[in-house]
Amino acid sequence: MDFQGFVNNLKSAALSVGETFTPVLRESKFRETGVLTPEEYVAAGDHLVHHCPTWKWSTASDPSRVRSFLPVEKQFLITRNVPCHKRCKQMEYDEKLEKIINDDEGEYATGDESGWVDTHHYEKERTETTASTPSIAPPPPVTETAAEEESDSDDEDAIDLDELLESGALDEDDPNRFVARPESPTGATDGSAEVEKIRTYDLHICYDKYYQVPRLFLMGYDENRRPLTVEQTYEDFSADHSNKTITVEAHPCVDITMPTVHPCKHAEMMKRLINQYAESGKELAVHEYLFLFLKFVQAVIPTIEYDFTRAIKL
């Protein structure tokens, strides 16, 4: 076991001990602090499953992992085979697409470092605008020389097909002809062509009893459905978050270690987003919590295209 694995196991053990001694939250503090009770987590999960059918409830892998404060059949949420078409480093950075999610004034005012920078907040709007405005190139102007050449070509004699056949010109291979090449097993036609390698992810949303918020776990696979290494998975995390909020820890309901978005700042950030939602004249109901949570997580994994069909605009 390497040093990082030892540290991850130590963190998981410490969190497990912390959860054991942390009482289950019974009183709703959703609006005050951004946390959820287990009952509110289940209600929000039911709402997500109803509106986004690719999300499903799942049970624990074995009875010893069942968490008693949650229904047996609703231990965590899962969506499978979520496409990830490109790596984060392939995304072109444009500061015009950024939106800083932060409070500048009031009770929850914070410094610049603790704010959430959504690096591709306006990407969808730009894509839709580009798609709805097709560009049509104007025809090239006809010059006098071109007009004369076209006129001369019209005066030339037509080709005699009988003479062409007798000359044997048709038997020769045209060097400019198209020749189809068989594709290789990976879909590449030659070594220089860069083939898009589509990864897929299984995403899990668990309830973290210690932090009292939802927590996202990820399991990635390559184009041949082989599990990704931790290093490969980090290629699909935003560089601004990969070394700060991503850890590798034991899944609470399944006997496996997976990368996870650490929830230590989730409640603070969710409270901030709830405040901004209220400032726009709207009130977020507790059962809509996970939609806002998924929008927040999208800044961490911008290239993983999970089902998020209900729009939450800040």
Image (cartoon, rainbow, N blue to C red):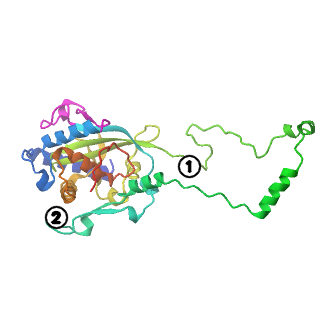
Residue 74 occupies which quadrant of the picture? top left
290 or 304, which is in the foreground? 290
x, y percent for residue 273: 22, 57
Q: What residue span does the magenta drawing correspond to?
A: 52-75
Residue 6 seen: no
Q: Is residue 250 left or right of residue 227?
A: left
Magenta region includes residue 67:
yes
Kindly state the secondary structure of the residue where label 1 is placed.
loop
In the image, which is nearer the foreground, mark 1 or mark 2?
Answer: 2
Residue type at numbered disc 1: Glu
- Of the numbered discs in the image, which one, if any, rests on residue 194? 1
N-terminal of the two: label 1 or label 2?
Answer: 2
Where's residue 115, x and y in %? Answer: 26, 64
- Secondary structure mostly seen in the magenta stretch: loop
Query: Pointer 1 and pointer 2: residues touching (CB < 8 Å)?
Result: no
In percent of the image, x 15 and y 67: which residue is there? 106
Q: Which image quadrant: the C terminus?
A: bottom left
User: Would you call the spot at circle 1 few (<14 residues within 10 Å), some (14-19), or many (20 or more)?
Assistant: few
Q: Which residue is mark 2?
A: 108
Residue at 55% over, 39% down:
186
